[in-house]
């Protein structure tokens, strides 16, 4: 019996899968080996995020071989953050491990995570030591994490992804947040309690292709910033204040020049540039407002977060709430 976890406690692993037929069996083997070595009760909840390949078939086969495998299958692709959220709603254990299917984060770190958890941390997240992605993606990530930590109202650790072990109390806190545009690592930080990081080597994908392209990453970054920061909104108020003050100063300078020196200001190009510049700033400002309003609209519509096509192994109450995406 591994010391970190009480015998009666169960660990739930939540794994979103979108077209992961190439890697899923390898991931399952590594994860199961790790779990078996820990000698604690466990369940693995797969969320098939509307895969169009054999992912669901593989999961169904795993379920037939082992009852501790449970799954939800979405009616279409709803996105990784929604898939994780759905999985968290089904968690029955006293702890949950959030793990991507592609083995970029090694399940073997679970042992270190549990050790930290037993020291009294309710959240133990992986800190990405070295990234194996290309330099463009790496620097974009780095820029995002720095931007995020400087504008966000919630203090979030840098270079920490979704890979984490979280205690039941934090699972419940995250589940109680009803928002539609979900940025889980933000919600995780927002939940509070004692949180710490473990430095993890981040491998390249074991097989298959990354599902995040630049558009999806931008959407995730925007969700992160807009859900946890008002700085973009405030920035335009500050900019407006600065421009108004500067233009008032300029007006005074022109007045003084006219009254004392007697020359009138000329300069058509300067006027055009100023008008265009201010027009541009205003449009960006309206755009930022639009981003927030779109998100408010999403929340007001109160649509279910996802639609379940099929599920197995959930308790009937969980199944009901999971089916309706609430
Ligand atoms: N994923 C998902 N739905 C999506 C995109 C991704 O469930 O729409 C899953 C994917 O199967 C994987 C995890 O989320 O288990 C991370 O995806 P990926 O490795 O493509 O992201 P990256 O590591 O590039 O951020
Ligand atoms: Mg990945």
Image: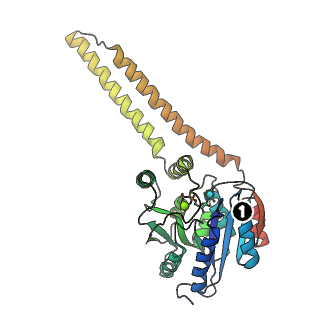
Q: Ligand 1 is in which quadrant of the figure?
A: bottom right
Q: Quadrant of the C terminus?
A: bottom right
Instruction: Say whether residue 263 is visible.
Output: yes
Q: Could you tell me which residue is drawn at 48 percent across and 69 percent down?
A: 126
Q: Could you tell me which residue is drawn at 48 percent across and 34 percent down?
A: 284
Q: Could you tell me which residue is drawn at 64 percent across and 81 percent down?
A: 10
| In front of the other: 251 or 7 | 7
Residue at the extreme bottom: 1
| In front of the other: 4 or 44 | 44
Question: How far across and how far down the image is residue 118, in percent?
Answer: 51, 82
Q: Could you tell me which residue is drawn at 41 percent across and 33 percent down?
A: 240
Residue at the extreme left: 261
Instruction: Say whether residue 175 is visible.
Output: no
For label 1, the SS is loop
In the picture, measured across the screen, residue 199 lies left or right of residue 252, that is right
Question: How far across and how far down the image is residue 39, in percent?
Answer: 60, 87
Count numbered badges in the picture: 1
User: Which quadrant of the figure has residue 241?
Assistant: top left
Q: Which residue is mark 1?
A: 54
Residue 58 vertical placement versus 278 (above, below): below
């Amino acid at each position: 019996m591994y010391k970190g976890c009480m015998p009666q406690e169960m660990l739930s692993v939540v794994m979103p899968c979108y077209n992961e037929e190439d890697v899923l069996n390898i991931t399952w083997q590594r994860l199961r080996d790790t779990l078996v070595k820990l000698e604690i009760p466990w369940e693995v909840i797969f969320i098939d995020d509307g895969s169009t390949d054999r992912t669901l078939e593989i999961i169904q086969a795993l379920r037939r071989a082992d009852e501790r495998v449970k799954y939800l299958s979405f009616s279409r692709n709803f996105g990784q953050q929604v898939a994780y959220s759905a999985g968290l709603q089904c968690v029955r254990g006293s702890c949950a491990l959030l793990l991507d299917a592609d083995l970029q984060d090694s399940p073997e770190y679970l042992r270190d995570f549990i050790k930290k958890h037993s020291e009294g941390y309710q959240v133990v997240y992986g800190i990405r030591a070295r990234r194996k992605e290309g330099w463009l993606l790496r620097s974009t990530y780095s820029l995002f994490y720095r931007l995020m930590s400087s504008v966000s109202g919630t203090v979030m650790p840098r270079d920490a992804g979704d890979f984490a072990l979280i205690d039941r109390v934090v699972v419940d806190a995250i589940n109680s947040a009803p928002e539609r545009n979900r940025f889980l690592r933000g919600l995780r930080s927002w939940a509070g309690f004692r949180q710490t990081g473990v430095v993890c080597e981040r491998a390249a994908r074991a097989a298959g292709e990354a599902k995040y392209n630049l558009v999806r990453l931008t959407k995730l970054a925007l969700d992160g910033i807009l859900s946890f920061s008002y700085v973009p909104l405030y920035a335009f108020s500050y900019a407006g204040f600065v421009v108004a003050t500067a233009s008032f100063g300029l007006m005074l300078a022109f007045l003084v020049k006219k009254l004392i020196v007697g020359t009138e200001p000329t300069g058509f190009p300067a006027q055009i540039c100023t008008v265009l510049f201010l027009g541009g700033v205003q449009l960006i400002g309206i755009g930022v407002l639009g981003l927030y309003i779109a998100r408010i609209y999403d929340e007001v519509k109160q649509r279910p977060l996802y639609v379940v096509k099929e599920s197995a192994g959930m308790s009937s109450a969980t199944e009901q709430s999971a089916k309706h995406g609430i």
